[in-house]
Amino acid sequence: MGLFAKIKKNYSMPSITGINQIDSLLQGPDNRWNIESAAGTAVAVIFSFPAELPAYADANDPENQGFSPFNEEQKVAVRTILDRIGSEFNITFSEVADSATAYGQMRFSNNNQGTVSSGFATGPGSGSEESGDVYINNADATNLTNIVPGTFIWSTLVHEIGHAIGLKHPGNYNAGDDTGAAEVTPYLSATEDHVWYTVMSYTAAPQEQERDWFGILDLGALEHLYGKKDVAIGDNTYTYTDASGLNLTMIDDAGGTDTIDLSQITLGAVLDLSPGSFSSVGRAWDESLAKNSVSIGLKAIIENAIGTASDDSITGNDANNVLRGGAGNDTLVGGAGIDAAVFNGDKSSYTISNDAGTLTVQGGDGNDSLTAIERLHFSDVRLAFDLDSDAGFIAKLLGVLAGKDAVANKEFVGIGLKALEGSTQEGLMGAALDAVLGPNYTSGSVIDMLFLNVAGVQPSDAQRTLYAGQIDDGTFSAVSLSIAVAETDLNATNIGLVGLATTGLEFIG
């Protein structure tokens, strides 16, 4: 990344939040624009672009030599960055005209910093009119043009604006510090003091990518300072290409059912949907796999993923993930939740094996290894392997309500699985009893049904009287007794539950 930037002031830094990942990025408890209110409250800040060196700046200071105003491209970049910050946090920026007597709280200018730094900024709360001022080094002409996401100057500008609104470096460094003092504690760990985590770090990406925005730890610090807005609350698809590996990007998503789509990428990816995770997606400058090029915000839940046409490794999160590996020999790991793997062809086009819960699916999509994947979706039918949880309960329910043959009814299974998504086992069994026996069923009719479907015989009069009496006297409810019978070994044997755990339970819908 090269020489990045400096912050002009050092601050006494006590523990602020008690969370090192946040405190390591905060200048101090009073270094924020909403200082007259509690941290996290909304605030409005004005900014401007001076045409000449501000009157309060010492013209004899070496740092104030070679002043030049921002050009139009620089101004557009600043406005774009501030607009996005305002869309994500409770800090609103408004541009005002700049004069000798009236100007913004934040002012953006260029000066000649030689080889000392690419830019510097003064944070809020410094006790001087310089608070919020940002200077970019005009001694390097590359700082003045092509200011777009993915370039060094873009990430420099985001970094400096971070300083101007209250963020500090997360490590023991401060380029060109006029006091000679190092950046103050606390610091991030050596692992986290990296541009992968924060745009405020000096530790560059090994493949020379630049951040196109703040990192996952920056969001936590800015949320503390100004409060966070919900962003991307709808159903969103995040599409990546080979070129995506040239930048370091982050997904900040607050809701909806979301998908990461890698289908346009020609190089196999390593994708992790877990909040706070990093994924290797796209090609770096040397055409190799871009390491940790995509991160997912600490609070973002991404449900679904579409892989590349090459060999992918895709890991889900605690949501109910739908993972589509596509072509290639893919490794899919579902994690918690009821997770599904999607395949393009009919079930008959694939060979499926189950080794202690690890599924191998071989066919037109490649040779895929699946772990903690409960459902397989083919073009004609679906398979459920969660026979120790939801799918197993549906099979057992069908066994006691309609007999063993009902378990082979794909439509019945699909209806049951869908209904269970919005209900409890007790609620679903109650609704099913009403559907099968009618809403005014008797305790005796329940006993007749259970005996016939599970044992294959009608109960004797004595048996009917005994068990129906236990429902009538409240020892059991019709629902609880039906569930108890559903969980018996006899019912499991009757419906072939052990075999289903190996082959999967077929369903449609």
Image (spheres, rainbow, N blue to C red):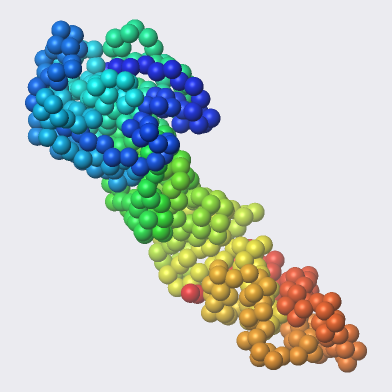
Above-or-below relation of 17 to 230: above
Residue at the right extreme of this rendering: 462
Residue at 51% x, 50% y is 317
- Indicate left or right for 87 with 450 as reference: left
Residue 476 % position (x, y): 81, 77
- Specify the quadrant of the image occupied by residue 13: top left
Q: Is residue 451 in view?
A: yes
- Specify the quadrant of the image occupied by residue 497: bottom right
Residue at 62% x, 55% y is 357
Residue 290 % position (x, y): 34, 36
Above-or-below relation of 35 to 400: above
Residue 82 % position (x, y): 24, 39
**In front of the other: 2 or 143:** 143
Residue 180 % position (x, y): 34, 7
**In front of the other: 244 or 165:** 165
Give the quadrant of the N terminus. top left
- Indicate left or right for 3 with 422 as reference: left
Residue at 35% x, 50% y is 231
Q: Is residue 279 in view?
A: no
- Specify the quadrant of the image occupied by residue 410: bottom right
Residue at 66% x, 89% y is 439
Above-or-below relation of 296 to 374: above
**In front of the other: 299 or 484:** 299
